[in-house]
Image: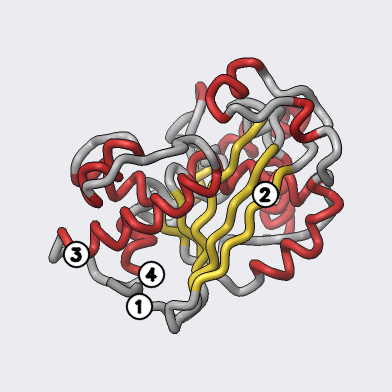
């Protein structure tokens, strides 16, 4: 089945130094660009993360510090990568929770402004979990009846995610072959920041989505507890989360 696309869509997967969006870095990125006419273009590149890869991460993706020692840093490829993905929608497996936030952090550290909020984002894992509750390896076996060789290599996982989505569309009549529909269906919350610290409630009001103030309106907390802003800005939160918080605070001052 060919996806019905208005814009090019990127299926992508990252391998990283660890699991922290704030502290860890990309060591491999693979992006499969699908054009509206169905043409495919794949780019896979290893990245020097400039920090050590954790042994736990290496045990999963088998990329060592020596493997990436002479590779370009993300900052060196950021501008050309941003140009290549400009105007594309996004799709991935667990991408909303992890891959997109850490990719945005890398762009921000590199000083390359990029905003995916106007893009449609499909998370194939969320579709899978709503329908079947499985891992990517099981999803590939379940939907495509294939074994996923080289699991946890960025390129293998990228192609598998693309194939799984197409098989999901064939299996479930209720799923529309429409990027906007799939993006909304696969989204669990309406995030203001990529890490999901702030989300919109049913009245489109920003609320806090973690910690002791979870469920409270962001405006109320910043008004009643001004030190909350300083605490977050000095804390171990993503650059994007801090930027989102600052933009909201400035909008309060201007309203």
Instruction: Give the mark nearer the N terminus: 4 vs 2.
Output: 2
Choose top left, top right, bottom left or bottom right for residue 133.
Answer: top left
Numbered tag placed on residue 104 in the rendering: 2
Callout 2 environment at 10 Å: few (<14), some (14 to 19), or many (20+)?
many
Residue 138 % position (x, y): 27, 36
Distance from Cα at disc 1 to Cα at disc 3: 13 Å
Q: Residue at x 63, y 48 (%)?
A: 29
| Residue 228 appears in the rendering | no
Residue 194 % position (x, y): 57, 46
Is the C-beta separation of discs 4 and 3 under 8 Å?
Answer: no
Residue at label 1?
A: 4
Instruction: Give the mark nearer the N terminus: 2 vs 3.
Output: 2
Distance from Cα at disc 4 to Cα at disc 2: 21 Å
Residue at label 4?
A: 179
Label 3 residue SS: helix
Distance from Cα at disc 1 to Cα at disc 2: 27 Å
What is the image's colouring? secondary structure
Is the C-beta separation of discs 4 and 1 under 8 Å?
Answer: yes
- Quarter occupied by the C terminus: bottom right
Callout 3 environment at 10 Å: few (<14), some (14 to 19), or many (20+)?
some
1 or 2: mark nearer the eye: 1
Instruction: Give the mark nearer the N terminus: 1 vs 3.
Output: 1
Q: Which residue is drawn at 46% across and 57% down?
A: 91
Q: Which residue is drawn at 83% across and 33% down?
A: 69
Numbered tag placed on residue 54 in the rendering: none
Choose top left, top right, bottom left or bottom right for residue 181.
Answer: bottom left
Residue 116 % position (x, y): 60, 61
Distance from Cα at disc 2 to Cα at disc 3: 32 Å
| Residue 180 appears in the rendering | yes
Residue 157 % position (x, y): 46, 45
Instruction: Give the mark nearer the N terminus: 1 vs 2.
Output: 1
């Amino acid at each position: 089945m060919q996806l019905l696309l208005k814009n090019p869509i990127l299926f992508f997967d990252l391998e990283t130094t660890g699991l922290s969006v704030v502290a860890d870095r990309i060591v491999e990125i693979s992006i499969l660009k699908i054009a509206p006419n169905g043409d495919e273009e794949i780019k896979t590149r290893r990245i020097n993360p400039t920090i050590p890869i954790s042994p736990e991460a290496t045990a999963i993706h088998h990329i060592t510090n020596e493997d990436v020692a002479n590779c370009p840093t993300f900052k060196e490829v950021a501008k050309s990568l941003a140009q290549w993905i400009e105007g594309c929608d996004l799709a991935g497996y667990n991408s909303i929770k992890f891959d997109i936030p850490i990719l945005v952090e890398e762009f921000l550290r590199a000083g390359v402004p990029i905003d995916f909020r106007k893009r449609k984002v499909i998370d194939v894992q969320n579709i899978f979990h709503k329908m079947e509750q499985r891992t990517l390896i099981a999803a590939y076996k379940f939907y495509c009846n294939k074994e996923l060789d080289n699991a946890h290599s960025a390129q293998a996982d990228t192609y598998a995610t693309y194939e799984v989505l197409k098989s999901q569309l064939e299996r479930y009549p209720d799923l529309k072959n429409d990027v906007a529909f799939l993006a909304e269906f696969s989204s669990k919350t309406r995030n203001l920041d990529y890490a999901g610290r702030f989300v919109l409630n049913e009245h489109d009001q920003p609320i806090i989505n973690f910690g002791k103030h979870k469920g409270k309106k962001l405006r109320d907390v910043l008004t009643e507890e001004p030190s909350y802003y300083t605490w977050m800005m000095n804390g171990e939160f993503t650059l994007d989360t801090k930027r989102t918080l600052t933009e909201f605070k400035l909008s309060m001052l201007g309203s």
